[in-house]
Amino acid sequence: MGVQYEVRGPVAVLTLANPPVNGLGHDTRVALAAGVGRAVADAAVTALVITGAGKAFSGGADIKEFGTPKSMAEPNLLSLILLLEACPKPVVAAIHSVCMGGGLELALGAHYRVAAPGTSVALPEVKLGLSPGAGGTQRLPRVLDVETALNMIISGEPVKSEVLAGMPGQKLFHKLIEGDLLDGACAFAAEVGAKPGPHPRVRDLSARHANADAYFGFARNMVKGMAKNLPAPPKCVDAVEAAVKRSFDDGMRFERETFVSLMFTPESKALRHAFFGERAAAKIPDVSEDTPKRRVDKVAVIGAGTMGGGITMNFLNAGIPVVMLETKPEALERGVATIRKNYDAQVKKGKLKQDKLDARMALLSTTLNYADIADADLVIEAVFEELGVKEGVFKTLDEVMKRGAILATNTSTLDVNVIAGFTKRPQDVIGTHFFSPAHVMKLLEVVRGEKTAKDVLATVMALAKTLRKTAVVSGVCDGFIGNRMIEQYGRQGGFLLEEGCTPEQVDKAIEKWGMAMGPFRMGDLAGNDIGWAIRKRRYLEKPHMRYSKTADLLCEMGRYGQKTGAGWYDYPAGKRDAIPSQAVVAMIEKHRADLGITPRKISDEEIVHRLVYALVNEGAKILEEGIASKASDIDMVYLTGYGFPLFRGGPMCYADQQGLFNVVQTMKGFAANPLDDDTFWQPAPLLAKLAAESRTFT
């Protein structure tokens, strides 16, 4: 780890070597500074080239150091950039593959920059709730036009080097090098090294805009609508405006103050938590990264309905052949037609080219015969959510599938251990709970049965990455992680109706707080009859568990949601607009009167905390039972599958930020409410323990 040093003729080559993306951690910064000093002291060296080993120039700062003393330990990134600028010999940054964040800021401190075509260039700090902090907002507008620079900074999205190199008046790249980058960079460095100085510095250029006041006013309005609840994008606008209107040094001071202030916002902490949580989800405590994986070259999907078709599209998108099996030809025809219709829609929107559509459809075959899927490496059943149906499927799969094939169930609530027991090879059985629409939603709950083999688990987790899913491992329990928790969220919604709320008030309060959808709009989208079936099972299995009867009464009215044009809301024909229903309000009011409840005014704050803390308390139980191995896994389920606001970091992260002591005290208040479920509001033992010890989940 660090920097490799070599001399090629008159050029010293300093290669960042800190895999996987050559992050600029403290050790690397120390080594780079030492390498610069060594090159300056060597009379035979006339120029320096800085490049990166492997598949990146540099991905930027090491965010594991954020908020720690190491992040600012000398030489920090700012000091390193000043060292390059002040170097008496010309410094050339040879950029390739990935040049992002602090890596781009480092390159902007060099005198010259050359790049390989196809390099992804970005300042992605805004995605972590931050602004660039080592000169990015001040230098980028000096080498590109101000509008391009600001768009890159507030979006955080990468732009290819050849696109930037082709912009009129750009001074970011002095040369785009085809062929061997390092050879070309060394030749360029030798050439500029033979010329007398001084050599160009980005800080000496001007950032100009013909109508700055109007432009930055427009940019602020645009960002306000685009980045609601996120403080970083508007601060980035301020920092780029400083590049135009202030001196370079004043702008740098302003940028640094902005960066430091954003570092400690709850939004940035939440976004960084999500960033690490996504990477941590792939790490399973007892399954090492070098666990052998089974080959998955061919997949079979049982069921051609909405879920089966969506699952199939994931594999087709990844270039993996799929055989789709159904019991009736017309079901297969409908399934294939829906897949083609989905792809046609992408072509019409310009998101997919026709040749790609044709290539994907060519990977799809269909059958009515189980014998035709016997050679598949992985089979996923997506049939009706009823144990008897699953039993028939898995007994047949056990008979026909080749030895070593992975047998996966897409169940959302049923016991994977029971399903595995329908086979003589439970070690090959695993749960793959896709979320609808399966070809769109990012979350994949991977359900590990008691006997699931480690190589099966490792294979499915690796495959999820190929499918561009965020995979989270769950143990076996009713509803796994996500649906088990959402049931408590829905229960609280029902109690709020009985106590005085309308569905619209509850939904508006939690959506204003940041959730993509409140419990009642969510129920209408999923189908209220699904929840009704679960409650009927609960009444038999857990008679002590209290529910509001409002949801049952709604279903008895035939109001199952969007699919019937009426649920908690009315839905005009052909539209999905949720219109408050007087019939539903009347039903709720009658139910209250039957219970003898006098409605009360309930604040948005109470609504939000009852809904969110219901998730938190159930999440604590899930952690304690080992269903989830870490709190961040629960947060990733909610961020990627349930519309939890990214800027709040997930339910467990949000609870940490509120302070677990405060969460417990608030829950005690809810437990004292005679119309709520006092048993549920007893803090989970883990939550109570962490609160008492002033600790956190994450």
Image: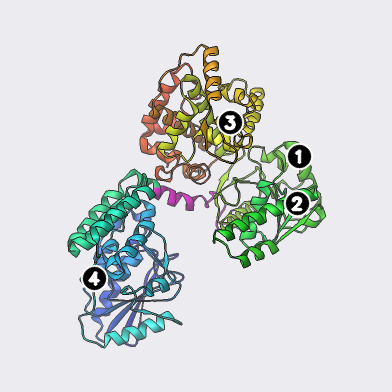
Q: Amino acid at mark 2?
A: Leu
Single out the mark in the foreground, 1 or 4.
1
Earlier sequence position, callout 3 versus callout 1: 1
Query: Residue 12 location, x and y as percent?
Result: 32, 81
Judged left or right of residue 150, residue 163 is right
Cα distance in 3D space between marks 3 and 1: 28 Å
- From the top left corner, tell me how far across and down residue 265 is, in percent: 31, 45
Kindly report the distance in space between the C-alpha atoms of the residues bearing marks 4 and 2: 66 Å
Mark 3 neighbour class, 10 Å CA radius: few under 14, some 14 to 19, many 20 or more = many
Q: Which residue is mark 3?
A: 567
Q: For numbered disc 3, what is the local secondary structure? A: loop
Residue 57 visible in rendering: yes
Disc 4 to disc 2: CB gap under 8 Å: no
> Disc 2 vs disc 3: which is toward the camera?
3
- Identified by mark 4, the residue type is Leu
Question: Sequence order check: which comes first, mark 1 or mark 4?
Answer: 4
Which residues make up the magenta segment?
271-289
Mark identifier at residue 332: 2
